[in-house]
Image: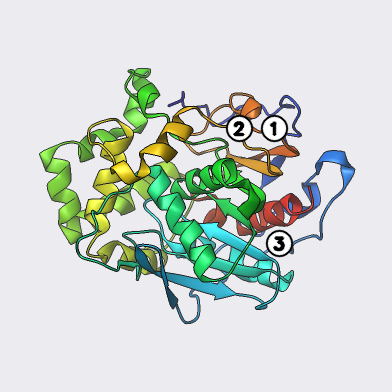
Amino acid sequence: MINRRTFSKAVGLGTGAAAVSLSGMQAGASAAGATRQAGGASGPIVPTITAGTQAEFGTIKQVKAGLLDIGYAEVGPAHGPVVVCLHGWPYDIHSYVDVAPLLADRGYRVIVPYLRGHGSTRFLSRHTPRTAEQSAVALDIIALMDALKIEKAVLAGFDWGSRTADIIAALWPERVKSLVSTSGYVITKVSAQLEPAPPAVEHNWWYQWYFATDRGKKAMENVEQRIALCRYVWTLVSPNWDFDDATFERTAQAFKNPDYAAIVLFNYNWRIGLVEGERRYDRYEKQLAAQPPIAVPTITLDPALDPFTPPGDGSTYRDHFTGPYEHRTIANIGHNLPQEAPTVFAQAVVDADRL
């Protein structure tokens, strides 16, 4: 856990990384034109679009993968280089509804799956424990790639999606061509979470403590109350995002999954050591507790208005990334970076693929 930054922080150069202030607000100044890559090379420029240009994905596909029947959107040429975009909480695949066609237009095959407990993703067996330790979610995505015969992909994410992508890059780097990780290195070390944090940091995580109570559990198990809670979280963590009712309601449909409450509650309770994970994942969690380095080419993104990210130069997590690396700070943008600033996010994917 980390201290919340002020919204008017200065942006400088991080250790071994180019920190770039990019405006991702609607159709403002071209973020793509401001990007810089290590070594001076730059990828194709992604055109600037207004956030909310796209409303829906097309048909949602389903594939049996590992423990799940995973629902996912697919956009772009079937034989293009693959990008897997991973959403967070409380969000769904629509965080990438604008990003995906931008990447598809650059020739990428874009896969956007619902994580376990979300949308049309379902467990194959009613006997499978509804757990959500971090390695379990990562293994779901490995299983998805196997099922779709994807040997290697660019992974891009935020929130739970960043953590999942980071884990795959750290433990299975042979499956990752490059990485875009919003908020940097976010692999959870449970033992570190057992120590108290400064009051302002604890305040930011109010819902995590709420989920550890009977009241929070009851709220999450009530569909109407959980949806109201999720909407409130959106307003707190993305203070400049003026989303409308239709935008939220599209995503809120994913929160009606029958396993949603169990998955979300388990994930947050597991992170702070209140529940134990399944033994099948113990060996992976032991590896992750050691905070393994990530050697694949990586761009880390820091949304300046996100209450959870460390100072904007990325220096607090720079040492975790040992391969080609760049850091970017995104001005005026909150937690749901790909949906708030789709051009900026898509450009980072294109550039990371060329690091």
- State which quarter of the image contains the N terminus: top left
**Mark 1 secondary-structure assignment:** loop
The residue at which mark 1 appears reads as: 322
Where is residue 65, by image quadrant?
bottom left
Q: Residue at x 61, y 30 (%)?
A: 320
The residue at which mark 3 appears reads as: 48
Q: Residue at x 35, y 71 (%)?
A: 120
The x, y position of residue 34, in whole percent, is 78, 47
Q: Residues within 10 Å of mark 3 (few under 14, many from 20)?
A: many
**Mark 2 secondary-structure assignment:** loop
- Are the residues flagged by discs 2 and 1 in contact, CB closer than 8 Å? yes
Q: Residues within 10 Å of mark 1 (few under 14, many from 20)?
A: few
Which residue, as the protein is rendered here, is positioned at the far right? 40
The x, y position of residue 254, in whole percent, is 33, 65
Of the numbered discs 3 and 1, the one sitting upstream in the chain is 3
- Can residue 24 be seen from the camera position used here? no
Of the numbered discs 3 and 2, the one sitting upstream in the chain is 3
The x, y position of residue 9, in whole percent, is 60, 27
